[in-house]
Image (cartoon, rainbow, N blue to C red):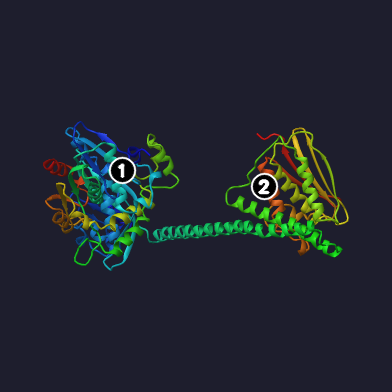
Amino acid sequence: MSELGPIDEYQDLFENAPCGYLTIGPDGRISKVNATLEAWTGFSADKLIGQRLHQFLNMAGRIYFETHIAPLLRMQGFFNEFALDFETAAGQRLPVIANAAERRNSDGTVLFTALVLIKATDRRRYERELINSRSELRKGLAIERETAELREQFIAVLGHDLRNPLAAISAGARILQRSGTLQDDKELRVLDMMNTTVTRMSGLIDNILDFARGRLGDGITLSRDANRPLQPVLEQVVDELRTASPDRSIETSFAIMEPVNCDRSRVGQLASNLIGNALTHGAAYQAVRVGAKTEDGVFELWVANAGEPIPAIAMGKLFEPFFRGDIRSSRQGLGLGLHIASQIAQAHGGRIDVTSTPDETRFVFRMPLQSN
Amino acid sequence: MDVLTRNNVRESGRGLRAIVFAHGFGCDQNMWRFVAPEFESDFKVILFDHVGAGGSDLSAYDKTKYSTLDGYADDLVEIGSELGLKDAVFVGHSVSSMIGILASLKAPELFGRLVLVGPSARYIDDSDYIGGFSAKQIAELLEFLEDNHMGWSAAMAPSIMGNPERPELAEELTNSFCRTDPEIAKTFARVTFTSDNRGDLSKVTIPTLILQCSEDIIASEEVGKFVHNSIPGSEIVFLKATGHCPNLSAPAEVVSAIKAYV
């Protein structure tokens, strides 16, 4: 190479550059090509010169050249970073990335159009893989979304349909109770058990429906009413749970001195879920303690139980849906109770905090008395 | 929605009679930049972008509506009635030739003259009919379009589209014209190259001129003659201009051919 003179160097740079050079005359026909392009395409210069560029492109490239590249070159004088596919003399595809620029003289007439072509077999294959994987992902995502929606709709329908037979059992049990036909202790105990189970099950169904609604986009909806008293609602919740677990003790201390702007039945559901959780996980021989008060513009409801503390590993997951602690299977729920409770708390602009020590496990719900 | 905003309709010129220029696949109303101004002294000149192209409202792009040329023709009829067009001259390039024919069949009062530049009633060969392309080649084109982003970047698109008055936002992109969302480009290509309007040609009763280029690989002479022979009473003029876009490569020839006819 050292014996090449400066002019030869330019000549060599044109002919043997690591890219293809090609010029198109004002008549739209190829006027110059370099040796690199001859080698890549397998066509010698005399085969290329005088022909139209699109004759050496595949059909897609031809259409693209006519509908996009030629108009853009005429409008803005250049067109950069476009893809083209040549068809080589051997019938192979030669993918390139190209830049093109028009050269015009002072009166604006086109002298020639210069193209620089970079062989891009690997690059184009890589881009094609990206495009393919993107469309695969889109397909997969669409299927996933559809499945998830179907699943959630199924949960909603299931929850709804379970309510009716449960209402029938509940009504039947009430009729038996009122008729006074059952006298035997054992029979009365069965009736109690039926009532307990119905209460527990309707709580589970409420949670399922709330969960499904949350997932389906409606979220927890509130109908707040600050003017009506909250305490009777909480007392009723506790009474129901006492009936459902007659062998357990629930102690209450309520001091609700100011109106609480909340959805009373939702807060009742929250209390029911927290107390139900304490009854399930707390030590059976010690009372579950429930308290509520208003203080410094905040409503506070707390539920405490004795027994084994919550393991550290479980603390972070308590409020996740379908999380279930390590408990005997007969008492297992769906793992939705605490999740729904925290959703209700959030909907009220409040939160639930939990502390758990060997002495006591305590859930505390706090919300502002007035909503903003 | 405002039809004129949706289709980026531009009006200019001093004439009473209107002339509407419609762009084809690949670009936008810029295709007429060397032709349209020549008509401003005698005509009310109307330029527009098909929805999905140029400065049209991309949020109006409805994949179902625009999966047939009818959707585009409906837009053209809406533009015409919004502007109160009657007896106007319609100049359609490439696929817009057929869009104009469809619109004229839907609303016969709209146009009094049709000028079709490089028209094709069907691009894909069909037994005896030579459209110029095989179905396989068109399938390859649709795939190939994904290889060319045309200066389109999903990240940049909103800022360009939302701020036409701030061109500097677009400076880092390669092209100033014909930017198209590749998805839309692909759908438009499919509609264009799989269309078959041979059956509509004989219904045309408006005086029609066909401008046929030489060496046009998109719409060959054979294809142009087919359109000419199928539209009763139509005229055909063979241009010296080569390629598919004489409106850019030989605007003077196109202007004089249209002026001689209208």
Where residue B100 appears, as percent x and y from the top left, is 23, 47
Q: Nearer the viewer, residue A89 or A75?
A: A75
Using the rendered image of the protein, determine whether residue A18 is visible from the camera's viewpoint.
no
- x, y percent for residue B259: 13, 40
Q: Give the SS element for disc 1.
A: loop
Image disc number at residue A269 = none
Q: Which one is closest to the eye, mark 1 or mark 2?
A: 2
Instruction: Tell me the element at label 2.
Output: helix
Residue A225 vertical placement versus A59 (above, below)? above
Q: Residue furthest right?
A: A285
Q: CA distance from mark 1 to mark 2?
A: 49 Å
The amino acid type of the residue labelled 2 equals: Gln
Which residue is identified by label 1? B49
Please determine whether, in this image, residue B18 is positioned above or below residue A90. above
Label for residue A343? 2
Q: Nearer the viewer, residue B221 or A298?
A: A298
Q: Amino acid at mark 1?
A: Asp
Asked if residue A68 is positioned above or below residue B222 in the image, the reply reads above
Quarter holding the C terminus of chain A is: top right
Q: Could you say where residue A232 lies in the image, as x and y percent from the top left?
A: 78, 42
Question: Quarter of the image holding residue A283?
Answer: bottom right
Left or right position of A77 against B63: left
Residue A152 placement, left or right of B162: right
Q: Position of residue B128 (x, y in %)?
A: 19, 66
Q: Residues within 10 Å of mark 1 (few under 14, many from 20)?
A: many
